[in-house]
Image (cartoon, grey):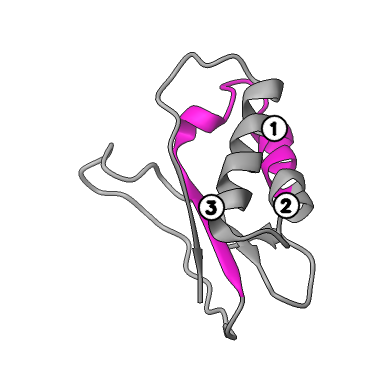
Amino acid sequence: MIFIPKNNKARLAGGPSDLLGIFEAATFAVEKIEVEPGDRFVMFTDGLLKQLSIKAELDTLVEIAQKHRDYSLKEMMNKMWVDIQATKKQDDDQTFLVFEV
């Protein structure tokens, strides 16, 4: 998940975790984040990440979120989608959600 504070740079939130819904006994990182009105989050499926270069792909997603942070939620999602498609050939389901506090 990407955290986009209203008045700061976008960053990854949480930490390394198992994939949701894959393992019967999964472990998930926990991070408490104090949020304020206008803060945003981007949640996404693993289909947005390449298998071999997950760290680079995560950094790219954070950069894309940062680049479009000042648009409305709908415009932000549309612009992010265009950038994501320009950087990766679709070979898996790709889903992401942007929401604002």
* Residue found 67% across the figure and 26% down from its top: 53
The mark that comes first in sequence, 2 or 1, is 2
Residue 39, placed above or below residue 28: below
**SS assignment at label 1:** helix
Gap in Å between the C-alphas at discs 2 and 1?
A: 10 Å
Residue 4, placed above or below residue 57: below
Front label number (3 vs 2): 3
Apparent side of residue 59 relative to residue 16 in the rendered image (left or right) = right
Residue 59: quadrant of the picture: top right
Instruction: Kindly identify which residue carries mark 1.
Output: 83
Front label number (1 vs 3): 3
Gap in Å between the C-alphas at discs 3 and 2?
A: 11 Å
| Percent of width and height locating residue 61 | 67, 42
Most foreground residue, 26 or 97: 97
Instruction: Kindly identify which residue carries mark 2.
Output: 68
| Percent of width and height locating residue 21 | 26, 42
The answer to whether residue 50 is magenta is yes
The answer to whether residue 27 is magenta is no
Span colored in magenta = 39-62
The N terminus - image quarter: bottom right
Instruction: Kindly identify which residue carries mark 3.
Output: 74
Q: Amino acid at mark 3?
A: Lys
